[in-house]
Image (tube, rainbow, N blue to C red):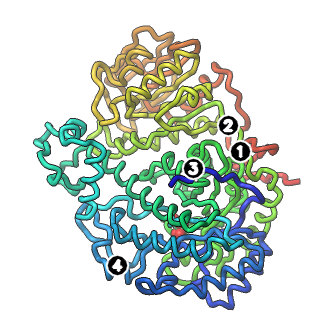
Amino acid sequence: MTTGNAHQFSGPLYYGGDYNPEQWDESVWFEDVALMREAGVNLVTLGVFSWANIEIADGVYEFGWLDRIIELLHANGIGIDLATATASPPAWLLKNHPEMASVTQEGIRLAHGGRQNYCISSPVYKAKSTALAAKLAERYGSHPAIKAWHVNNEYGCHNPMCFCDISAVAWREWLQIKYGTLHSLNFAWGTHFWSQRYHDWSEINPPRQTPMGTSPNPTMMLDFHRFGNHQILELYKSERDAIRASGAKQPITTNFMSMKHFRYLNYFEWAKEVDFVSTDHYLISADPLSHVEMAFEADITRGFAEGKPWLLMEHSTSAVNWQDVNYAKTDGQLFRNSIGHIARGSNGAMFFQWRASISGSEKFHSALVPHAGTNTRNWRTVVELGNKVKRLEAVSGEATKPAKIAVVFDYDSWWALSQRNLPSTDIDYPDLVHEWYAALYDLGARVDFITTGFTREKLEQYELVLLPMTYLLNDADESALIEYAKNGGSLVTSYFTGISDENDHVKLGGYGGRLVRDAYGVFVEEFAPQSPDAQLTLDNGLVASHWQQWATSKDAESVIRFTEGPAEGFVAMAKKWIGRKPSWYLGTRLSPESNVAFFGTVLRELGIETAGGSGVEIIQRGDLTFVIDHNQNTVDWS
Ligand code: GAL
């Protein structure tokens, strides 16, 4: 059952966070709701890790505490995003079903004691989590305090893949559906290589640890990512459908992790299965450009949501507890973070968590109510932010203004590039995408994110489409991009784009396939990867590193060449009018400053307007224009 994004936000922007009342004596709950009212909290996510407190033994439920807190929140006008409580299976379940625990690539079965320990293909986990979701939906589905359903939590965060024997069976079934015949599978995986040909389905196992110095078949590994994504999505759908089947009418979501290095779930696909997109975002606090990374993640989340409003389900009021040095947020930083997310489409600002825990692994994670209580910088900021969020209510349900530039973000390419045996270990997909984004951010250019599987209509919404290392391109997408450029669109295409097809088979006759070879007329005959420390100058003065290639251009309007290195004199950049407008090919990795110079030229030539830049964001959402200055200046709120 697909719920199909039916939900449109209405009412106020949401403000609040994860609430774990089971960690506290009930007397504290009364203070909690009073403080929530003081801060303007109107939504809490309840029960994320409560399985062991709700189902205390197989089929034995203790709902009393949950009934009481739901009534108390309701009596105080606080809405609930009710979790299905399935994020972390209780000890009794793993004890009864030890085979349910996840197994690593090296064959280690993981122990209870952390969280989220289950095999993503476990029928027991699926049945038990679905049953709990159904039970909660039957009991609370018609309760007026419930505003949304929060299925599970951050799927795949700790267990994106499992290599156990149960997974092996599910994996073979998935492959049989995908390929139909072993012949097709052998072709797709290129199994004539290294004697890998399969003669019976039972010979296929998950891509477990292989002998020293070797890695699993790359296409098998790519498929294993696709399989993992599919299995976890099935877990989500099973819970979601159980909630719907109970008659509950509230919108259903699950919180994504829009974070730079979480690659395992294809959120463009997932977004089609939720009623509204929600996500979590935590700053890498040591990163001086963390606000740029944050803007990226908010923008890509808006891309998952296809431009519709979404919800920031978690961020932190101050420090987290899981980085090397957990820097506290500086004065004003929280406002800029939360409001920045709202400007980019979040229908509110939610946090992990309401009250800082006194025990457990997250006891030093910041919260809305800190250990030191309410006479604190933290609490005063939380109350002030609650007021600010309320004042922005006019944008609730409104979309952020779409951009003129689209960045293609492709999970398949990321999955293929996250493996070994590439021309260089410095090929880093998210790094290049983020570097391009950072340059555009610096220039004050806004972007939307789109994914592969292009339609003509989608591409034609944009004046400029960027392809940073879109390594896998199937025939249809390659044709769509060429057509788009021929019909008046502009492209910027990086090196290592269009190298392979959807099976990760290299396209012959010049790297980059029809797009690079025929449309751009650039013939890439050999790669010459370089050290990240290499400083490669180009004949227009720009500076690059990491990558060169022996490339020549047939008929580009202008060509920039390397002035040093093994590929000295060969094409580093080419500008070509594929259609009525110029497109650019970038055969190297420019330095941050050179990226700004390069994209600045592109924007000028195409006449794409910018606003703000250099740390100042200017974003239109609904009738409001948000101006956010990240240069540690103060902003006038009057
Ligand atoms: C998220 C998670 C929360 C909490 C938080 C800490 O990954 O959903 O439960 O652990 O991180 O930053």
- Of residues 14 and 213, the one drawn nearer to the viewer in this rendering: 14
Earlier sequence position, callout 2 versus callout 3: 3
In this figure, which residue is indicated by the disc labeled 2?
Answer: 402
Q: In x, y percent, where is residue 239?
A: 48, 65
Spatial CA distance of label 2 from label 4 is 47 Å
In front: mark 4 or mark 3? 3
- Three-letter code for the amino acid on which mark 3 is drawn: Gly
Q: Please tell me how crowded label 3 is: few (under 14), some (14-19), or many (20+) other residues with Cα within 10 Å.
A: few
* Residue type of the residue flagged with mark 2: Pro
Q: Find disc 3 in the rendering and name its residue.
A: 4
Q: Considering the numbered disc 1 on the image, is that residue within a helix, a strand or a loop? A: loop
- Given contact means CB atoms under 8 Å apart, are the residues at marks 2 and 3 in contact? no
Residue 399 numbered tag: 1
Gap between marks 2 and 3, in whole Å? 22 Å
Q: Is residue 292 visible?
A: no
**Residue holding disc 4:** 94
Mark 2 touches mark 4? (CB < 8 Å): no
Comparing labels 2 and 4, the label whose residue is closer to the camera: 4
Q: For mark 1, does the 10 Å Cα neighbourhood hold few (<14), some (14 to 19), or many (20 or more) residues?
A: many
**Measured from the top left, where is residue 493 in percent x and y?**
47, 27
Rendered view: 414 above or below 348: above
Q: Nearer the viewer, residue 463 or 556?
A: 463
Residue kind at label 1, given as amino acid type: Ala
How many residues crowd mark 2 within 10 Å: few (<14), some (14–19), many (20+)? many
Q: Are marks 1 and 2 in contact (CB under 8 Å)?
A: yes
Tell me how far mark 1 sits from mark 3, CA to CA.
18 Å
**How dense is the environment of label 4, judged by Cα within 10 Å: few (below 14), some, or many (20 and up)?**
some
Looking at marks 4 and 3 on the same chain, the residue that comes earlier in the sequence is marked by 3
- Asked if 137 appears above or below 449 in the picture, the reply is below
Secondary structure beneath dot 2 equals: loop
Amino acid type at mark 4: Leu
